[in-house]
Amino acid sequence: MENEKQFNEPKLKYFKPVGKIILVMFLLFSLFLFISTIMIIIRTKPAKSVKMPDVVGQRFSDISNSLIRDGLKPDVRFRETFNVENGIVLKQHPESGTIIPEGNSVRLTVSRSGYLLELPDFVGKSLPAVRNTLRNLHSRGRNFTIATGVISYIPSEETPENIIIAQSPKPGERITPDYRVNLLVSAGNVKDERYMPDVVNQSIDIAYDLLAAKKLNVTQEIVETWDKSLNGLVTEQYPAPKSPLANNASVRLKVAIYPVKGHPYYAYERIQYRIPASYSDGRFEAYVEDDGQKRICFSENMKGGEQINFVFHRSGKAKITIMRDKEILTVMGINVRDH
């Protein structure tokens, strides 16, 4: 018995340090597994996602900082343009609404124009002729289109209607193709003029402003056309040209609209809005704000359940505010989007 005890004692002395070593190795291996698991979780943690906003039609200078704040990197590519002002986002990738990881690059195509054109003298010329000239200015062997800015009508006893009285910038000034030309136009002798002007084949934006300046109530009858050359033009009018008109007389214009896919920077737009049936009679108006100027494009006495229906010319993004007796009823928006 004593010999057996002496035989086991060396074994116990040997296994005690071996067991400690195994325990330490097990603890170290467990710690390694734990740290590895944490690292895998951290590395595989999904990146923060961002919803791509709609920036087409906006100025790059207005939206660049907000994109950077959202964690996106604008990758800007420029395109030479001659009928879009400088610095406008023409295209974007990815499209609006796309969910992308924070830190991704977004590709933006931005308009750039560096040409200088000498502005002709438009004073004394008719508005349609001036608009034609602005659409087809020639310089350095190329054709350019200059957009009109604010067109204001004032009564004049000396100057016939639709004739340019003044312009800004002045004749001879050098402008870039993205510049807008503001025009002051005669509405004729509004006080004594009581005859219906001839607005057939005139654009609705000019015809509406002219008739509104004569304090006439204008109703539009909209008809679709597949003849692009008729887009936005008045094709019929009532009463006929030179018909006598009473104060606050009502006139009806038939206006052609060519269906366009998407929303190019310059376009004629059709607005349709059904007035809630609960609304009582009132004066309903539509104010339009775009890259041109704020203006009234619709004004009629109507009642609940009737439909507001009109065409207007838009430059860039537009906000349309529908009002009843000067109180806001609803606000609509149109974004520039080529397809």
Image: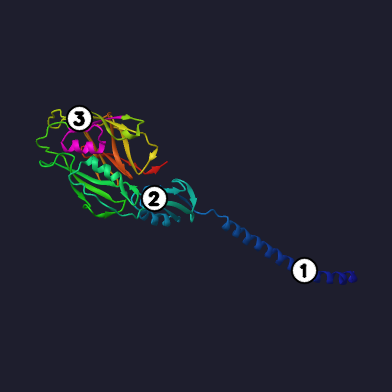
User: Which disc number belongs to residue 251?
Assistant: 3
For disc 2, the neighbor class at 10 Å (few under 14, some 14 to 19, many from 20) is many
Residue 295 visible in image:
no
Is residue 40 visible in the rendered structure shown here?
Answer: yes
Q: What residue type is labelled 2?
A: Val
Q: Do the residues labelled 3 and 2 touch (CB within 8 Å)?
A: no
Span colored in magenta: 197-222
Q: Distance between the residues labelled 2 and 1?
A: 73 Å
Amino acid type at mark 1: Val
Residue, disc 1: 18
Binning the other alpha carbons within 10 Å of mark 1 as few (below 14), some (14 to 19) or many (20 upward) gives: few
Q: Mark 2 points at which residue?
A: 89
Q: In which quarter of the image is the N terminus?
A: bottom right
Q: Disc 3 versus disc 2: distance between alpha carbons?
A: 40 Å
Residue 200 figure quarter? top left
Cα distance, mark 3 to mark 1?
107 Å
CB under 8 Å between callouts 2 and 1?
no
Which residue is more in the foreground, 137 or 3?
Answer: 137
| Helix, strand or loop at mark 2 | strand
**Which numbered marker is on residue 119?**
none
Dots 3 and 1: beta carbons under 8 Å?
no
Q: Is mark 3 on a helix, strand or loop?
A: strand
- Residue placed at 28% from the left, 34% from the top? 233
Of labels 3 and 1, earlier in sequence is 1
Q: What kind of residue is marked 3?
A: Val
Query: Front-most of 299 and 132?
Result: 132
Q: Where is residue 272 in the image (x, y as percent from the top left)?
A: 31, 33
